[in-house]
Every structure is written in structure tokens, then in C-alpha cells.
Image (cartoon, rainbow, N blue to C red):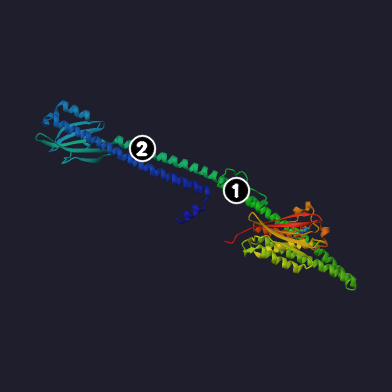
């Protein structure tokens, strides 16, 4: 039994479905047919009994009305009447108390098949003579002083034959139904499994050929095509993510290579001549330190970016009141950049956002640091906030070198620095805005920028406002 279960479990799905459908169909059909057969058989038997009953009543009435002695049973009229009552394959016999035959009429029925039996009351008997099934109805009668038994018997051969035929029709019908259900089960399973096979094929292709493979041709709108659509979407996301990862590694190694190459150049210089030449020594050490600082900045930036990409928005989220928060930021910025003037414009109404305070601080500081770095001669930075349509907008405005309009869409890309030549003196990694964008998006926020060259830049941070309930 266990091995059969094991074997069945290991069968392909198509076979399981086919066997399941066939078994179910067989059970349904067999139960229904068997019940139908039994009911029909019972009903027909009942009919036969009723017929015998009616015949017996007719005979009794006739005896009562038309005869007065056993002698009158021999009259041709009586014989003719009894013969008329009889149907095909039937017999009627009247016997006296000693078992002597008083009357016998039969149609296609041999009276020797049943031996005479006296009856004290009405009763029905099922008897067999060889292959023949016989139903006998016996009833006592009284004719003047004469007493005896009426026996009416019917051969149920036709009834049994009909029953056998019915059984065969049902068995053959059942067998055909099982065959048809097995075939249709196989066809349905095949149809049902085709998209699943296509899906499996596509997954196999992805394994062999790479992430660009997709499942096609499943457009019937059912659950399987929904699964295929989800699979394709997942593959799209995976492909994008893999491409971004690859791009990230390419960009990062490219960015890291430059300072490392410069550093290597200076170290070689020092190795060859720097030991004895203080001027070379000094120049190379200063340049090397600058590259090391840049390397450090890059590594820190990369780390921050990875954290921003992987952190969950729900991590340590708190309700933050914007006005006091920005006032704190202003104090820190003034301490860090004393040569700058920071102007803070606060809205009357104080709004709140829900996020990790360290993240908000990181985002605002990236933008303030940029405003400071790219401000040039004008050292005024304007920080403001307002609430519109359940959104908090924090803006940081500088009056510095600005960004050419064509470059604006790129500044949020990793490692992107506007006009590298222009920026050479200004230290930076091109990662700050990318980190800020990643972080703010975690909280369903946005970062946008407007700028005019040599006039200044305005960065707007938009976050959903919340109320503390
Ligand atoms: P980083 O400042 O380290 O180079 P960011 O990602 O913060 O990197 O900025 C990307 C680029 O966008 C900068 O290199 C700079 O060219 C430009 N940029 C950002 N903020 C400003 C600003 N306030 N004014 C002018 N240019 C800016």
C-alpha cells in the first residue's frame, strides 16, 4: 500500500489529474447507475406483484359471482374467462384441499414447474426452476362446500432478461464514460499544463541563457497567465537590478581606479627621487594625502549608498517636528561653516513627518553641503519649509555657480559630477545626491532641483506630512 502511494506521488501531474478524473467519474457513474438499476428493478417487481394481485382479485370476484360448485369450473365459459385473464408465460391452477386439480389454464408455462401447495392465507413466493425465475401468488378460495387454493404463477424470464440487458447497458455505458473521462481528463490536463510547461521552459532558458528570457504566448487571462505575468515582471526587476549592480560595480571601480592610479604615480615618484628631494617629497605627499582623502570620501559614500538602498523605511521611524528640526540643522551648519550665513524661514503652522531622524538629517546635510561647496563668492544659504496638500516641502537655496539646464536630469545619477573640469578643485564623489534620492524615496518622498548657471540652485525635498494620532 505504502509503495503504491509512493509510486502515485511520483507520477507526473498529467497522470495524476487523468487518474483522478477517471476515478471520480467511475465512482460517480457506478454509484448513480447502480442506484438507478436497483430502483428500476424494485419498481418493476412491484408492478409484477400488482398484476398478480389484480388477476387474483378478478378470479375471486368471478368465482363469487358466476360459480356455485366445483363442477361449474369445468364449464367452457369459465375456462375461457380464466384464459382471457392470463397473460403470456403465466399459469392459473385451482386445487382442492387434497391437492386434486380442479382447473388449469396455462399460456406458454409448464404447470409441472411448480408443485401444488395449499395456502391458508394470501402469499407470494419467489421460486426458481432451472434458469427460470417464477413468481407465484397463492390464495385460498371457497366454492360452496368446496375449499381449496388458487395458484397464479408468472415466469419472470422477460423481466430478468430486461434486467440483464439494463445491467449490461449500464456497465458498457459506465466503461465508455470512464474511457471518455480518462481521455478528456488527459486532454484537459494537457491543456492546463501547457502554460506551466512553457513557464518551466522559460525558467530553464533563464538558467541557461540569462536573465533576458521571458515567458511568451500565455495570454488566456487565467491564473497561469497571471503567474507568467508576475514571473516576467520579476525577471524585469531582476534584470534591472542586475544591470544596476553591474553598472554600480563598473562605476565604483572606475572611480576608485583614478585616485589609486594617481596615488601609485606619486608613490613611484617618491620612491625614485622623493627621498632626497624635499620639494618633490612635499608636493607628492600633499597630492597623495588629497587622493587618500578622496578615496576615503568615495568609500564612505559607497557605504552610505549601500545602506540607503538596503535600509527599510520603517527602521527607527519617529515623528519629527520640522520647525525645531530645521532650527537644529541651522545651528549645526553655522558651526561647521562659520563663514556662511544661513537664513531660516519657518511657516506658521508646524508640520510633522515620520521617518528615521538620522536619515532626514543625512538628506538635508547632503543638500546644505552642496549649497556650501558650489556657492562661490556669495555665501548666503536660504533654508525654508512650507506645507501644501499634506506634503512638507523643505527647500535649500544657494546663490552659487548653478547647473546648466541640460545637466540637471543627470545630477542624481551615481558618480555624476557636472563638468568634471569645473569641479576639480571642489572635492566630491558624485554620490551625495544619489544617496539623498535613495533615502527620500524610501519614505515616499521626492527630491527635485531647479537651477540657473551663475545665479544659484534650489533643491526641494518633498515628504508626506503626518499627524500624530
Ligand atoms: P558631489 O557634490 O560629491 O560631487 P553630488 O551627488 O552631491 O556629488 O552632486 C552631483 C553634482 O551635482 C555635483 O558634482 C555638482 O556638479 C552638482 N551640484 C549638486 N548640488 C549643486 C549646487 N547646489 N550647485 C551647483 N551644482 C551642484
Q: Nearer the viewer, residue 92 or 50?
A: 50
Element class at badge 2: helix
Q: Earlier in the sequence, mark 1 or mark 2?
A: 2
Q: Which residue is at the far top?
A: 76
Quarter of the image where one finds residue 217? top right
Q: Is residue 281 above or below residue 147?
A: below
Question: Going by the image, does 334 lie left or right of 271?
Answer: left
Q: Nearer the viewer, residue 221 or 369?
A: 369
Residue 124 image offset from top left, x and y in percent: 22, 40
- Decide: few, some or many residues near mark 1? Use Cα within 10 Å; few <14, some 14-19, many ≥20: many
- Residue ID for mark 2: 166
Element class at badge 1: helix
Task: For marks 1 and 2, give the CA distance.
Answer: 50 Å
The C terminus sits in image quarter:
bottom right
- Residue ID for mark 1: 228
Residue 347 image offset from top left, x and y in percent: 68, 60
Task: Decide if ligand 1 comes within 8 Å of the CB at mark 1.
Answer: no
Quarter of the image where one finds residue 449? bottom right
Q: Nearer the viewer, mark 1 or mark 2?
A: 1
The N terminus sits in image quarter:
bottom left
Q: Is residue 330 visible from the viewing direction of this image?
A: yes
Residue 279 image offset from top left, x and y in percent: 90, 71
Q: Nearer the viewer, residue 156 or 204?
A: 204
Amino acid at each position: 500500500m505504502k509503495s503504491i502511494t509512493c509510486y502515485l506521488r511520483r507520477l507526473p501531474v498529467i497522470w495524476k489529474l487523468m487518474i483522478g478524473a477517471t476515478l471520480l467519474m467511475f465512482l460517480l457513474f457506478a454509484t448513480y447507475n447502480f442506484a438507478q438499476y436497483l430502483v428500476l428493478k424494485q419498481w418493476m417487481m412491484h408492478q409484477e406483484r400488482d398484476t398478480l394481485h389484480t388477476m387474483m382479485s378478478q378470479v375471486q370476484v368471478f368465482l363469487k359471482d358466476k360459480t356455485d360448485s366445483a363442477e361449474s369450473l369445468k364449464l367452457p365459459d369459465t375456462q375461457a374467462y380464466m384464459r382471457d385473464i392470463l397473460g403470456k408465460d403465466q399459469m392459473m391452477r385451482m386445487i382442492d384441499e387434497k391437492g386434486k386439480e380442479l382447473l388449469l389454464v396455462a399460456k406458454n408455462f409448464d404447470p409441472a414447474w411448480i408443485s401444488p401447495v395449499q395456502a391458508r392465507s394470501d402469499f407470494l413466493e419467489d421460486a426458481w426452476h432451472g434458469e427460470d425465475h417464477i413468481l407465484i401468488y397463492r390464495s385460498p378460495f371457497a366454492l360452496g362446500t368446496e375449499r381449496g387454493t388458487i395458484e397464479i404463477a408468472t415466469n419472470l424470464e422477460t423481466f430478468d432478461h430486461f434486467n440483464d440487458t439494463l445491467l449490461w447497458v449500464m456497465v458498457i455505458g459506465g466503461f465508455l464514460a470512464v474511457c471518455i473521462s480518462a481521455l478528456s481528463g488527459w486532454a484537459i490536463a494537457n491543456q492546463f499544463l501547457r502554460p506551466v510547461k512553457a513557464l518551466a521552459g522559460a525558467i530553464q532558458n533563464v538558467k541557461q541563457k540569462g536573465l533576458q528570457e521571458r515567458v511568451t504566448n500565455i495570454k488566456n487571462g487565467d491564473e497561469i497567465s497571471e503567474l507568467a505575468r508576475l514571473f516576467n515582471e520579476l525577471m524585469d526587476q531582476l534584470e534591472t537590478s542586475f544591470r544596476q549592480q553591474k553598472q554600480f560595480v563598473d562605476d565604483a571601480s572606475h572611480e576608485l581606479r583614478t585616485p589609486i592610479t594617481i596615488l601609485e604615480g606619486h608613490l613611484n615618484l617618491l620612491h625614485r627621487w622623493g627621498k632626497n628631494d624635499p620639494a618633490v617629497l612635499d608636493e607628492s605627499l600633499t597630492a597623495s594625502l588629497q587622493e587618500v582623502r578622496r578615496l576615503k570620501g568615495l568609500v564612505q559614500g559607497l557605504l552610505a549608498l549601500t545602506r540607503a538602498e538596503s535600509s527599510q523605511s520603517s527602521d527607527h521611524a519617529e515623528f519629527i517636528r520640522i520647525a525645531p528640526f530645521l532650527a537644529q540643522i541651522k545651528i549645526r551648519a553655522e558651526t561647521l561653516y562659520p563663514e556662511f550665513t544661513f537664513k531660516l524661514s519657518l511657516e506658521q503652522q508646524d508640520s510633522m513627518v515620520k521617518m528615521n531622524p538620522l536619515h532626514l538629517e543625512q538628506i538635508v546635510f547632503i543638500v546644505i553641503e552642496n549649497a556650501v561647496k558650489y556657492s562661490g563668492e556669495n555665501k548666503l544659504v536660504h533654508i525654508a519649509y512650507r506645507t501644501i496638500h499634506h506634503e512638507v516641502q523643505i527647500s535649500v537655496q544657494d546663490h552659487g555657480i548653478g547647473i546648466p539646464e541640460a545637466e540637471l536630469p543627470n545630477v542624481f545619477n551615481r558618480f555624476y559630477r557636472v563638468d568634471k573640469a569645473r569641479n576639480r578643485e571642489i572635492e566630491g564623489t558624485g554620490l551625495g545626491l544619489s544617496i539623498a534620492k535613495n533615502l527620500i524615496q524610501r519614505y515616499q518622498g521626492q527630491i527635485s532641483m531647479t537651477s540657473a548657471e551663475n545665479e544659484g540652485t534650489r533643491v526641494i525635498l518633498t515628504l508626506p506630512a503626518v499627524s500624530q494620532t
